[in-house]
Image (tube, helix red, strand yellow):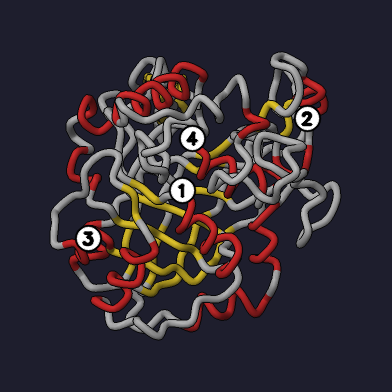
Amino acid sequence: MNRSMVAAAVLAGAMALPGAAFAECSADNWKDCAGKPWVDGSDMATPLGSQWWPHPLWGEGDEAGSTNWYTKPEVVMRALSVIQEGKVYRLGHDYHADMPLFGARKFSLRIPGTPTGGAFGANKIMWNDEFLATEVGQVGTQFDGLGHIGVQVGADGDKTDMRWYNGFSAAEMGGPYGLLKLGTEKLHPIIARGILIDVAGARGVDSMQKGEVVTMEDVRNALERQGMADFQFAEGDAIIIRTGWEKHWTDPPTYNDGCPGIGMEVARWIAEDVKAGVTGGDTWPVDAVPNPDPACAFCVHTYLQTRHGIVNQENMKLTELADAGVYVFAYFYSPAPVRGATGSMGAPVAIH
């Protein structure tokens, strides 16, 4: 997310709570944010609380984060074991120039020549090629890699103290032709057991409202409605949240103007209790925007991705899955190994 988006989210949050006072915890005074939901511990060594590197599971220098789960045969076999009918669901939207795009991002596809080449040979072969200009990892049904979201720990502008997953700094990562650390080529292909948590369905609405926060009570209610009250989550599961915001996909101004999503209560459950391999949702950040606390600028992102290294799939198409009553499935997604990229386009797939 760019600086203007973050600023807009913070401003929107402040506007949502006109009488609230959060002067003790702000972007300019983050050391007084101890006790906030996104802060771990009481030692304000960073804006997230305690130092988060090296990663306690994957160790110093790791660049694959939660995708390490999918190098474990038992996690992959757990995913494959839930396939019952062999029915495939595409969980990604089509990519085109008129889809919701954030900030100044663009999606421009051209077919030079049409056809691009030919005819050649006695068989008169011809072909079409395409040229695509876009933020290849951050448009459409996008996948956030671990080089996407970081935190300014030291003085503003100090690249040695801009920290990402596992403590990598902007000074180490920066390069004019792609990230030198935490590029998507470092991630493993994902074959996870996916669990859809249909919060919109449990609330009895076609869509939640922007800024509404998915709570653990919502999660429990959705699981009970889905006949999964006693479901046992496991390490490496993909946790997919449906809010119904997908209904606005063809109306970009509405879709981009905030969204419902999970808050820190659910984020902590995902990271600490489940130890998930993937989070995903039918909104553009999976966080709620605006957050009820204006001091939180996408704090779910920094908690899950920067601190815990859990990758995130955004702008998913989930209504077909929910309408079919498919809540547990094998989840397949292989991030495009573009060296130095911050994320990946692509269509995640559920197989039931």
Say what amino acid the circle numbered 4 marks. Cys
Please identify the quarter of the rendering in which residue 272 is found. bottom right
In the displayed structure, does residue 302 sit left or right of residue 186? left
**Earlier residue among tags 2 and 4:** 2
Q: Do the CB atoms of the residues marked 2 and 4 lie less than 8 Å apart?
A: no
Front tag of 4 and 3: 4
Q: Which residue is mark 1?
A: 313
For the C terminus, the quadrant is: bottom left
How far apart are labels 2 and 4 at the CA level? Answer: 22 Å
Who comes first in sequence, dot 4 or dot 3?
Answer: 4
Residue receiving disc 2 = 169
Query: What label sits on residue 128 in the rendered view?
Result: none
Would you call the spot at circle 1 few (<14 residues within 10 Å), some (14-19), or many (20 or more)?
A: many
Rounded to the nearest whole Å, what is the CA distance between mark 3 and mark 2? 41 Å
Rounded to the nearest whole Å, what is the CA distance between mark 4 and mark 1? 20 Å
Q: Quadrant of residue 113?
A: top left
